[in-house]
Amino acid sequence: MNTALMAASALAGTVMSSVISLLPALHIYNLLGGLVLLLYGLQDTGFTIPPGIYLPFMTGLIVGWSMLNTIPSILLGAPDESAMFTVMPGQKLLMQGRGFEAVMVTAVGGLAGVFLLVGIFAPLAPRVLPLVRQVLTPHLHWVLWVVITYILISEWPKGGHWGPAGWRKFLDAWRSLGAGLLTFTLSSLLGFLLLYRSPVRVESAFQNILPAFVGLFAVPWCLFNLLSASEIPRQYVAVSIEVEADRILWGTVAGGLGGGFAAFFPIITGGVGGLLAGHATAQRDERVFLLSQGVSKLVYYAGAFLMFFVPGLRLRRGGAAWMLHSLYLPQSAGDYLMILGAMALAGGVSFLMTPALARWTIRFMERANYRIASAVALLIAVILVGILTGAAGLFIMAVATGIGSLPVLFGSRRLNCLGLLLVPMACNLSGFGPRVAGLLGLLR
C-alpha cells in the first residue's frame, strides 16, 4: 500500500474527528460502530476498501477525537465519562475566563501521551506485554474488585459544617457519599439489566450501552445547564502557554500510568484512569492535574486500540478494537508500524488544530446563548439515541438520566455511574454473575 495514501487517510480521519469532537453528545465509538457497519455493507456488495486505507483513517479518528474532545469537555462542559476529572479544574478556569488556557494545557498532555505511546511504549510492548498478560489474566477478577473498592472509599464524606453537632451535621457530611453509593448501586443494577435482558432490539445490540451512557453523562449536563442561571464569563485567549518541564514530566508519568492501566484491563475505562492520575497530581498543581488528564485520556483510547496490533499480544480492549476484530485481524508487524505512524501524524496535526478550534468555540460561546448550545446538545443526544436504538433506547436513556442526575444534585462524583460496567463484569469474571442475575429475576 502506498505510504502517501496511508498518510492521507490518517489525515482525513483527523480532520473528520475535528467535526465529531465538537458535537458534545457524539462519542467516537458511536461513529466507529457506524463505520464498521458501512464496511461490512460494502463487502456484501463486492466492493472492498483495503485495510491500508480504513485502518489509518480509524486511527486518525481515535487520536484526533481523544485530543480535540478536550474543547467541548472544558468550554462547553459536556464530557464523556473519561473526562469527568478534567471538568473539575477545567470548569474552575473556565469561570475565571481562562478556559482557553485549560484546553491548551490538557492538549499538551495529549501530545505527551502520543510521544509516550509511540516513543516509549511501542518498542517495549511486543516484548513486555505478552508476559504481563500471561501473569495477570488469572487475577483480573480481584483487580476489578479492588478498583471498585477504591472508587467507593475515595468518595469520602464531604461537608459536615452545617448546623450544630448531632444528626444534622452527620447527615450533611454523608449527603454526597450516600448519593454516590446510591448512584453506584442503581447504575450496577441497570448494567445487569442491559447485559442479561436488554430491551434494545437485536440489530442494534452493538450500541447496547449507548443510551445508558448518554443518559448517565451527557443529558444531566444539558438539563442542568438549561435550568441554571449561571453565565459563562468572557474568555481570555492567551498568546502563549507556559508549562514547566518538570510539570510536564510528572503529569505524563501519572497520566500514562492511569491511562495505561485503564487501557490494559478489561472494562476499566478512561474515567478510572483519570481518577488514578488525578489522585496522583491533585495535591500539587492544577496544570499538572489537567495535563495528566490529557495524557490519561489519549493513552486510554489510542493505547487500547494500539494493543490490538502489538505483535504477540493482539489484545482486544476498548470499543474500537472489539468492533474491528470481526472485520480485520492484524497480519504482521507491518500493521503495527502503520498504526504507529498514523498515530504520530494524527497526534501532531490534531494538536496544531486545537488552538484554532478552541478560539472558534469561544467565539461561538460569545455570540450564542449558552442555554441554546445546551439545548442543541440535548437534541443531538436524543436524536442519536433514537436513530440507533429506537424507543427502547430512549426509555433506557430516560432511566439513566435519573441516575446520572444524582451526582449533580448532591455533589458526588459521576464516576460512580461506572457501576454500570464494573459490577456486572466483576461478578462474571468471579463466576457468580449468572447467579446474581437470577436473584434479580433476569434469567426467567
Image: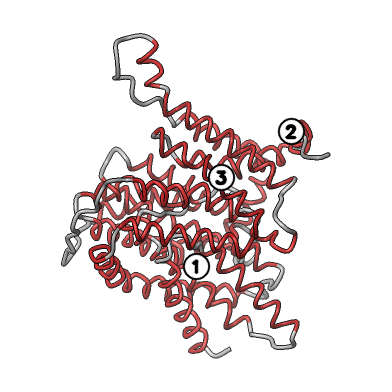
SS type, badge 3: helix
Between 278 and 124, the one nearer to me in the picture: 278
Q: Which label sits in the foreground, 3 or 1?
A: 3
Between 322 and 334, the one nearer to me in the picture: 322
Q: What distance separates the C-alpha of mark 2 from that of mark 1?
A: 37 Å
Is 149 placed above or below 42 here?
above
Query: Mark 1 — residue?
Result: 62
Between 414 and 215, the one nearer to me in the picture: 215
Query: Mark 3 — residue?
Result: 400
N-term-proximal mark, 3 vs 2: 3
Residue 95 located left or right of residue 110: left
Please tell me which residue is depicted at 38% across the width and 61% down the height of the picture.
110
Percent coordinates x, y for residue 119 in the rendering = 43, 66
Query: Mark 2 — residue?
Result: 440
Residue 290 located left or right of residue 48: left
Please tell me which residue is depicted at 47% across the width and 48% down the height of the picture.
271
Percent coordinates x, y for residue 336 in the rendering = 57, 72
N-term-proximal mark, 3 vs 1: 1
Percent coordinates x, y for residue 352 in the rendering = 31, 73
Three-letter code for the amino acid on which mark 3 is drawn: Ala
Is there a contact, CB below 8 Å, between mark 2 and mark 1? Answer: no
Tell me the quarter of the image containing the N terminus: bottom right
Q: Which label sits in the foreground, 3 or 2?
A: 3
Tell me the quarter of the image containing the C terminus: top right
